Amino acid sequence: MLFFRNRQGIVNVKMIITEEKILSNIDKVQKMINPNAKKQIIQLEEDAFFKDLIDSIKTYLTEYPKKKNFPFSVYKASYALVEYATNQFEENTKQIEGLIRQRETNISLASELQELVGNCQNKDKEWKAKVKQIAPRSSEDVIQALVIIGKAKNVEAENYVDALKLMQARIANLEANLHIEIDMERIEDRSKALSYIGIEVAEALKGIPTPAATEDDMIVTDVQDEYMAQTRFEVKPGLWQRVKSSRLVRALAYITKIKVVIDQPALPEGREQ
């Protein structure tokens, strides 16, 4: 059993959780999920400290003895934390969608370059026009390599061999999308942490009636308001509507689906997702 202390006094003495301690924990969580912070959560599964912080907040919300007298400062800070996490999760979703589109573009370009290399090797009558057509979407060294391959008369010449190696390397890199995979893993880990906040804290908040603010409460929360103004994303309306729709609750499943799309080589499935 847990025991609480607020401005009205100590409820029990076995284990005391104060308003100040919970506000401090909320602040620590907020800093850990701040995209501009130097130290951020890396892997949710391995970050016991982050989970302990969330658990302490959830426990305070769910086991507070008299919900009608719940501290306004903690309610406001918890609500703001969920709002902040929700907005960031939506930003992450946009980034993931952008990475999927970029991956599709890279795979398409790799296939196009592979075919064009063959056109240049076989001296296709339209190879020059095709190289010119792809120029706006390719780097200068790629275009130069294609021209060398197209004009080469000796396939054993050093410049021809080098040009062919360059093209093979670029095509392999586009197909592998290594940098996109790394970015996906980074965003996935952040999204798991953000969804964890939604699953644990938002659900606990739903069981607490909105408390009325006193003058002391407004003074205590002024400092946190300033921090939120400096670090939060643009606040969007309808927070509780987004929480009730269980978007964050389904976040882990959503991220898993995204990863399946990324792992699939075929383009149509990616576009559907």
Image: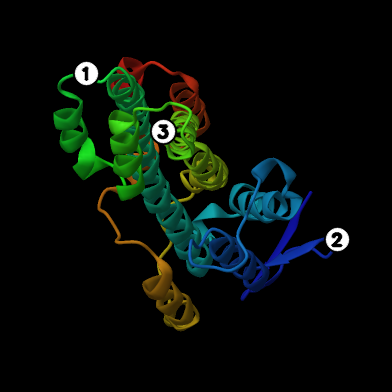
Q: Local crowd at mark 2 within 10 Å, few (<14), some, or many (≥20)?
A: few
Q: According to the image, label 1 marks what residue?
A: 124
Q: Position of residue 209 (x, y in %)?
A: 43, 51
Q: Nearer the viewer, residue 64 or 43?
A: 43
| Amino acid at dot 3 | Ser
Q: Position of residue 26 (x, y in %)?
A: 58, 63
Q: According to the image, label 2 marks what residue?
A: 14
Secondary structure under tag 1 reads loop
Q: Position of residue 203 (x, y in %)?
A: 50, 41
First in sequence: mark 1 vs mark 2: 2
Q: Going by the image, does 196 lie left or right of 81?
A: right
| CA distance for labels 3 and 2 | 36 Å
Q: According to the image, label 3 marks what residue?
A: 246
Secondary structure under tag 3 reads loop
| CA distance for labels 3 and 1 | 56 Å
Vertical side of 148 occupied by 21: above or below: below
Q: Nearer the viewer, mark 3 or mark 2?
A: 3
| Amino acid at dot 1 | Asp
